[in-house]
Amino acid sequence: MAKFQIPEWAFEFHGHKCPFMPIGYRMGTIALEKLGVGKSHNHEMHVLSEMGVGHPQGCMQDGIMAATGATFGKGLMEKLYYGKVAAIFWYPGKGGMRIVLRNEFADKLAPHEFFKFRKQGIQPSEIPEEVRQDIIDIVLNASVEELFNIEMLPNFEYTPVKGSFAKDKCEVCGEYVFERYLRIKDGKKVCIPCSEHEPEEKGFYYPIFKE
Amino acid sequence: MAKFQIPEWAFEFHGHKCPFMPIGYRMGTIALEKLGVGKSHNHEMHVLSEMGVGHPQGCMQDGIMAATGATFGKGLMEKLYYGKVAAIFWYPGKGGMRIVLRNEFADKLAPHEFFKFRKQGIQPSEIPEEVRQDIIDIVLNASVEELFNIEMLPNFEYTPVKGSFAKDKCEVCGEYVFERYLRIKDGKKVCIPCSEHEPEEKGFYYPIFKE
């Protein structure tokens, strides 16, 4: 049995067995330990993932969410789009920390058969079970020092976006819209699709933080 | 026992019991049924959530991920930032569909004691268990017709971002970076933080789709 254990439901959530969900789960577990906090049942910890788009290993983020409770749905995980297997963890009153997968560990995993299948375009769930279990066990048996570089960021500041329950109906399509996303067209309160402000309109929030 | 059941691990993942994770779980279940597909173990279904930032009810998205396997970590969920309790589901070769929570169902839930607590700033896990179970049961016992407006979008086209495994080390900090996010500074290949292109640099991908 591997030294570190991941609950079966985390694999169930993720959908397949691969090494990067477990890498993220271990990252999240360390963040909780080092910051001295428990899993975020509500809206406590925020995670700024340094992953981007169009590259593999994003599965890490599902592991972080499962371990920490800082989920995308609760608005607690944002991407920084740096293309790195790294994340910043911030907890109110506790400051932050950054965890990055060590190059040496990435290099150790790279020749594994798992990636030969992946680079042929074979999806994780189609890779032989024993190949997947073997690479997962390498992750679960590795020491924290072998896996990650960890930097504490005690002065890290992060300002979560201010929330509001206020909503109203779009006067064109009639659907409910939270006020932040209501626009005006011909004097009417409308949703973004009905406003036809797209595709320029991007009402997203880029996290404000300071190291 | 409620008519519809949600696996306990989905609540474990989400971190608390609230009505919107189950609303999302029911949305996701319907999407699988109507599109005639199973849970996405790998990278099949993509979800464009119409939620934004700074408003409640985003918990819906955790329910959608749990039901469909279209997770944030696997790059299968994006936000459209419209501020609506709605989502578009797309599956390769099957087209898309849109599901939106009915205004009437939102109005039916609105006077519930659960929201009185929430509007006082009380976090879901601090709300009495019986209050939470009662509102969850309302969601689980509602008919599909009562909950949602559903629109099939057979011609909906969506182009997932093209992936690549190529990576290299930043010549300043030495960390691995996926190539899409490597930049050039003083003739060196560097990561975005080392390039000091921030905060202008946003290498994110906004999904391209057509209804």
Image (cartoon, coloured by chain):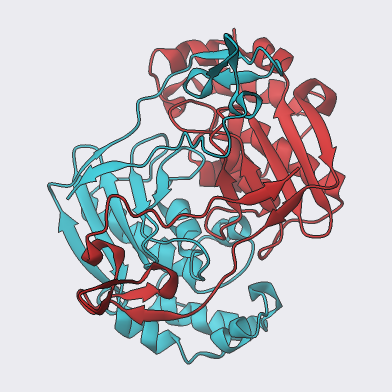
Chain colours: A cyan, B red
- Residue B109 x, y percent position in the rendering: 64, 14
Relative height, residue B169 to residue A84 (above, below): below
Vertical relation: A135 (above or below) A47: below
**Of the pair A11 and B186, the residue shown nearer to us:** B186
From this viewpoint, is residue B43 visible? Answer: yes
Q: Is residue B161 left or right of residue A35?
A: right
Residue A139: % across, % down: 42, 77
Classify residue B113 by image quadrant.
top right
Residue A5 seen anywhere in this rendered image of the structure: no
* Residue in front for this viewpoint, B127 or B59: B59
Which residue occupies the foreground of this view, A19 or A195? Answer: A195
Hey, which residue is sitting farthest left in the picture?
A155
Residue depicted at x 58% and y 40%:
B61
x, y (%) of residue B20? 60, 29
Q: Is residue B4 left or right of residue B186?
A: right
Q: Is residue A178 left or right of residue B171?
A: right
Where is A84 relative to B209, above or below? below
Q: Quadrant of residue B69?
A: bottom right
Counting every numbered tag in the picture gives 0
In percent of width and height, residue B58 lies at: 53, 33
Q: Quadrant of residue B40?
A: bottom right
Residue drawn at x 56%, y 22% is B132
